[in-house]
Amino acid sequence: MSGVLSGKRGIIFGALDERSLAWHVAMRCVEEGAQVVLTNTETAIQLGTVAELAAVHRLPLIACDATKIEDIEYLFSRAQALMGGKTDFVLHAVAQSMNLRRHKTYEEANYTYFQQTLDTSAISLHKVLHTAMKMDAISEGGSVVALSYIASERYFYGYNDMADAKAMLESIARQFGALYGRKKGVRVNIVSQSPTPTKAGGAWKEIEFFYQYSDHLSPLGNADADDCAGTCVVLFSDLMRKVTMQTIYCDGGFGRTILTPELVEDYREKGKERTE
């Protein structure tokens, strides 16, 4: 098979089941000619269906806790042995917040959970990149993409400590984009995705409302998992070999839209109702 990723090797963090953004990215990478190794924690592998999906599609699956350096070292070493060479691209789709899952308000966050949120959802990217650089595990000119959300830079009610984690994640991507770029030409970018129905997204109790709201506000409507996959594939490819330290908004234009005619009309109608 020939495609924009033909001959490339990649590691995909975070696939849990067939709804996962990471799973869609992995499938698109395979379609474009890449070899792919999947990875997630032991617990996630047991709770999700990624093991069955990996078996069906004959993709290697390696357990790895992205917060543990020794796990990441083993992952890169094992992936190189399985694929026959260094990794050309990495997807970081790792995020979890117990404060969010347990519906803690931002001002009443459990600080132990808060630290876990930052470690899992942001600092893990630092650990992955630091380990890859130390091991020289990513090919020169390779590409790393991490998934984020626009709450990293705007207030979103109910998103809580995950917003802080996403802001940190994007900062880490910029810092390593500069360092890794100068050292090995490795690109580090962020894809800021529309709210997408996934198991992880379900922890945000306002997700259903906001999914509808953002779809209404976005000129092109919400980007779905396949749109995210396509964006990641292009960033992994040599077509974007001079793009790094960027946040790419795969969100149908939501991030650049404040007001639409439909919202104005809705507001006017509600105003009429209040005065009648």
Image: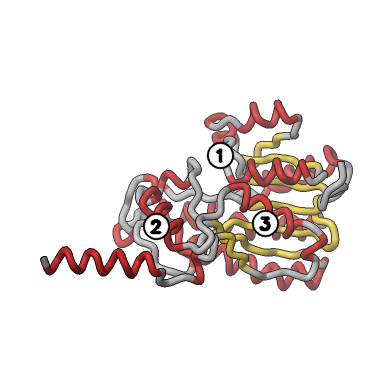
Looking at the rendered structure, the kind of residue marked 3 is Thr
- C-alpha span from label 1 to label 3: 17 Å
Task: Give the numbered dot on residue 19.
Answer: 1
Kind of element beneath mark 2: helix
Give the side of residue 87 with respect to residue 113, left or right: right
Q: Are marks 1 and 3 in contact (CB under 8 Å)?
A: no
Residue 253: image x %, image y %? 53, 65
Looking at the rendered structure, the kind of residue marked 2 is Tyr
Kind of element beneath mark 3: helix
Q: Quadrant of residue 22?
A: top right
In front: label 1 or label 2? 2
Image quarter of the N terminus:
top right
The 10 Å Cα crowd at callout 3, few under 14, some 14 to 19, many 20 or more, is some
Residue 146: image x %, image y %? 63, 57
Q: Badge 3 is on which residue? A: 231
In front: label 3 or label 2? 2
* Residue occupying the point 12% across, 69% down: 275
Q: Quadrant of residue 163?
A: bottom left
Task: Give the numbered dot on residue 58.
Answer: none
Looking at the rendered structure, the kind of residue marked 1 is Arg
Q: Looking at the image, which is closer to me, 238 or 119? A: 238
Q: Are marks 3 and 2 in contact (CB under 8 Å)?
A: no
Give the side of residue 158 with respect to residue 219, left or right: left
Q: Earlier in the sequence, mark 3 or mark 2?
A: 2
Q: Badge 2 is on which residue? A: 213
- C-alpha span from label 1 to label 2: 21 Å
Rendered view: 245 above or below 14:
below
